[in-house]
Amino acid sequence: MKITLLVTLLFGLVFLTTVGAAEKPLTPQQQRMTTCNQQATAQALKGDARKTYLSDCLKNR
């Protein structure tokens, strides 16, 4: 009985956490980071070139 209740509560907690996280929209900074990261990946940038590109992209240069 206790195990069933514990498992039910655990699944409920995980479900509520997942639903709450899915509804939260990205901030403008998070959107910019996602876009810049996708562009750097598309250009196959690595190492220092990637760091420089991301820095400039996030500063809107």
Image: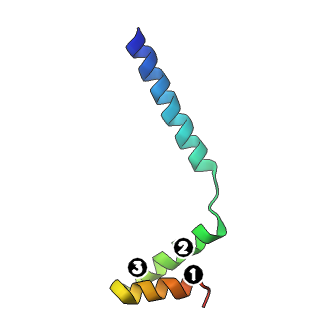
Sequence-first tag of 3 and 2: 2
Q: Is 41 on the left-hand or right-hand side of 36?
A: left
Q: Which residue is mark 1?
A: 58
Q: Is residue 46 visible?
A: no
Per the model, the C-alpha gap separating discs 3 and 2 is 12 Å
Query: At numbered mark 2, what does the secondary structure look like: helix, strand or loop?
Result: helix
Q: Which residue is mark 2?
A: 33
As drawn, 36 above or below 53: above
Tell me the kind of residue under disc 2: Met
Q: Is 52 on the left-hand or right-hand side of 60?
A: left
Q: Residues within 10 Å of mark 3 (few under 14, many from 20)?
A: few
Tell me residue 56's x, y (percent).
54, 88
Comparing marks 3 and 2, which lies closer to the viewer?
Answer: 2
Tell me the kind of residue under disc 1: Leu
Tell me the kind of residue under disc 3: Thr
Tell me residue 28's x, y (percent).
65, 69
As drawn, 38 above or below 13: below
